Image: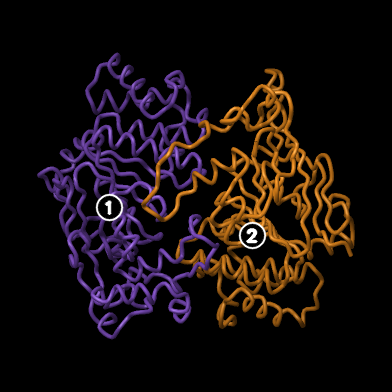
Chain colours: A orange, B purple
Amino acid sequence: MSDSLIEMTNAQLHYKVGNSISAMMGLPSTVKAVDGVSLTLKRGESVGLLGESGCGKTSMGRVLVRLEQVTGGSARFDGKEIGQMKGAELQAFRSRSQMIFQNPFDAVNPRYSIRRTLEEPLSNAGIKRGEWHDRVIAALELVGLGDPEQFLERFPHQLSGGQLQRVVMARALILEPEFVVADEPVSMLDVSVRAGVLNVFRDVRDRLGLTAIYISHDLALVRYVCERTIVMYLGRIMEDGPTEDIVHAPLHPYTQALVAAVPTPHVDQSHAPLPIGAGAPDPRNPPSGCVFRDRCPLVQDRCASDIPQPRKIGTRLVACHFAGS
Amino acid sequence: MTTLLSVKDLSIAYKVGSNDVVAVSNSGFDVPKGTIVGLVGESGCGKTTMARALTRVIADNARIAGGEIAFDGQDLAALPEAKMNALRWRDISFIPQSAMNSLDPVYRVEYQIMEVLRDRGGMTRRAARARAAELFEMVGIDKGRLRDFPHQFSGGMRQRAAIALALALNPKLVVADEPVTALDVIIQRQILDQLRTLQRELGLSVIMVTHDISVVAYTCDRTVVMYAGKVVEDCDTATLLNRPLHPYTMGLKNAFPDLKSAGSGVLTPIAGSPPDLADPPDGCRFAARCPFAAELCRSTEPAPLEVEKGHIVACHRASEAAQLRLEASKPQTWEAMA
């Protein structure tokens, strides 16, 4: 058994957009949601995918649980190409990898009781009916819903957001997956309950030895959950390394701006202007060369022609010609 | 410092079926002239209802059930609708939560700004056009984009346009309801910087409604914390964050991730959820979730008191706050409540 579970090599996910009219007008017809991403996740590793909306972080997560398939390059799970799995192998993969969605109220069927919500994956995976009850109870206990019996016959609207997000987590974990993608799982929750859900996530992951991807735009949350962080911008990886190093000494100019922009609960802040230009470019029409160059404070001529390849600086991989120099 | 707005004992009730749900109950706060005041709390705490009541734009089934809103020598709670309408945009303006939905998709942005300037400000077409360009410059959008439709703008630009609209007639007070919540961190920061700069330059008073303590820490001079329809603490932001007196404020701080802390630390949730406002408890509304609740807290509601100069808190145990803060910083204090 190799010690890496997930491997992406030059993976691409290009969406077709527009119609015949926009094509006649000469507008670009693809959005490169993921464009040439390579990474490896070791078994039991937790990685945060960090970036602004539209950077491709959710698309990448969806590829890894096969809600989308790569349009180029390769994405492998336990050595097998995810897009090529079929039959029994695919069925097994569906149990081994799971996704936790952003908005718990959208992620469950409002007409299913909590029992039925949790039994559905068991049924799909062909688990014997006799085991269902015990596994449902165990899953609810796992995510910290004490006295689980009282939840079984309730419906989603009878639960608070924090409770429902735990149910969504229980549903993802009930088949005992090895790999979980959590897509902004607490962004819809109030601050006072957010901490509880994050603690459950950390606790369960450690107890089950899960490999996890935590998708977020909030570095403070990623830091709380993941020891490694990957920063994405317009479908590409900008920086990849230990989270603490990224928080304390970001190397890529984009990461530097992101770290500077995160507000903290302290009053003594400098209010220094951010080292970054205003708007992100149109993803249909990204800049040539380095996709970050039109907002970058370090930009030089070379950035327009050469796509910076990730290079090793200390503990990190950084895709910038000039970072760290 | 003179007070621009003073809300006293305000109650707002929603009619739900045959019941009254009192979303804001006997609560008040002051806005000193030229300051930014934050209104924080979780969903359902009444912060948005409170903010909307200041402009008297509230839902059909809601009514002001008591109290007064003293603004510039008038009581807005009792003002006839025609007079209130004359104040909107000109004296008090509103930046809504989702600027995406506040601009009309079928009209050009310029038209929407000019509409306010002409109908509300009585400007001529030419003056309004010039002012629209000036406003765009103020909020950092190229005035060439005035002729665009809202869908041609990014989320951040739409939020800037909504700010421009709110500033159009030089109001005295701007009420901003979660103005940066839907935005990415970098744009969020740029919008907050812009808002602060404009506030300083124009001497505006701003009420900022948010659930995010770090947004308050970054922008607000004073902060009002609401819980279950009540103001529980009100003081200058630095003191609130460094020496909170209310256990709820202490709990909120523990639940918030902090990028500046040395390690990733431990976040501590506040167990339970807020009470049902259709049937609020007798005593302190936070008592059921409060690790420090005593007998008195469950029977008698604490009144807001100014316990230190400029620091108002509604808690029976406020005098022991120094000790409680120590206790509140330990995760096991809160875990015992779960």
Image disc number at residue B222: 1
Local crowd size for mark 2, using a 10 Å CA cut-off: few (<14), some (14–19), many (≥20): many
Vertical arrangement, residue A119 with respect to residue B8, above or below:
below
Question: Which quadrant of the rendered structure holds the C terminus of chain A?
Answer: top right
Tell me which amino acid carries mark 2.
Answer: Cys
Labels 1 and 2 in the same subunit: no
Q: Is residue A111 left or right of residue B300?
A: right
Q: What residue is drawn where x is 78% and y is 63%?
A: A43
Vertical arrangement, residue A33 with respect to residue A188, above or below:
above
Query: How far across and down, in percent of the image, does residue A237 sit?
Result: 70, 42
Query: How far across and down, in percent of the image, does residue A321 sit?
Result: 69, 33
Kindly identify which chain the residue marked by label 2 belongs to.
A
The residue most toward the bottom is B295
Comparing B238 with A323, the one in front is A323
Tell me which amino acid carries mark 1.
Answer: Arg
Image disc number at residue A226: 2
Q: Secondary structure at mark 2?
A: loop
Q: What residue is drawn where x is 37% and y is 50%?
A: A268
